[in-house]
Image (tube, grey):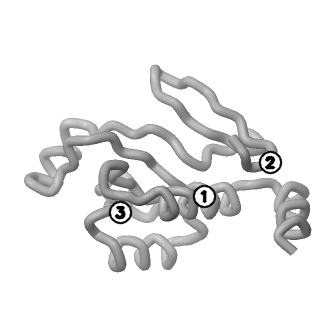
Amino acid sequence: MALPGSEERLSRGRLQWRVGGRLFVWERPLRAKEVQELGDGAPEGPVLGARVEHLIAKQALLADQPEVYFTTSHFEGHASVLVRLEQIGDADLEEVVTEAWFARAPPKLLAEAEAHRG
């Protein structure tokens, strides 16, 4: 919520965060089909969905930290990753949320944030 223009909403009993009406991170329990697809690799703890800038960024996260970031066939071709919250450190979580915000924020907010970052 510290990111400019961020809103927290409840949808279908799950929290999600938006900027300019656009979803950037959300609670994302796995569906039964996804648990079956992932098999033993399916996380038992909480999962967060997060937008990323593009598919190349997604592939980099998946390759660099597969113990933290993962995906399912539901997100094939979509610039989003799933995050094992029990496996991610605070600094990395802050980074993935901030990057998700930058991937979805409207141009005016992006310009303000860039000016602030300096």
Q: Residue at x 44, y 64 (%)?
A: 77
Q: What residue type is labelled 3?
A: Tyr
Look at mark 3 in the image and give the residue it sits on. Answer: 69
Q: Which amino acid does label 2 sit on?
A: Pro
Gap in angstroms between the C-alphas marked 3 and 2: 25 Å
Q: Residue at x 22, y 46 (%)?
A: 34
Gap in angstroms between the C-alphas marked 3 and 1: 14 Å
Q: What residue type is labelled 1?
A: Ala
Look at mark 1 in the image and give the residue it sits on. Answer: 100
Across and down, in percent, residue 47 comes to 36, 45
Across and down, in percent, residue 100 comes to 60, 58
**SS category of the residue bearing label 1:** helix
- State yes or no: discs 3 and 2 in contact (Cβ < 8 Å): no
**Dot 2: few (<14), some (14–19), or many (≥20) neighbours within 10 Å?**
some
Horizontal side of 71 relative to 91 (left or right) equals left
Against 12, residue 106 (above or below) is below
- Nearest the viewer among 89 and 10 is 89
Q: Which residue is drawn at 39% across and 54% down?
A: 82
Across and down, in percent, residue 93 comes to 49, 57
**SS category of the residue bearing label 3:** strand
Look at mark 2 in the image and give the residue it sits on. Answer: 4
Horizontal side of 100 relative to 76 (left or right) equals right
**Dot 3: few (<14), some (14–19), or many (≥20) neighbours within 10 Å?**
many
Q: Which residue is drawn at 41% across and 75% down?
A: 59
Instruction: Residue 108: name its quadrant.
Output: bottom right
Q: Which of marks 2 and 1 is nearer the N terminus?
A: 2
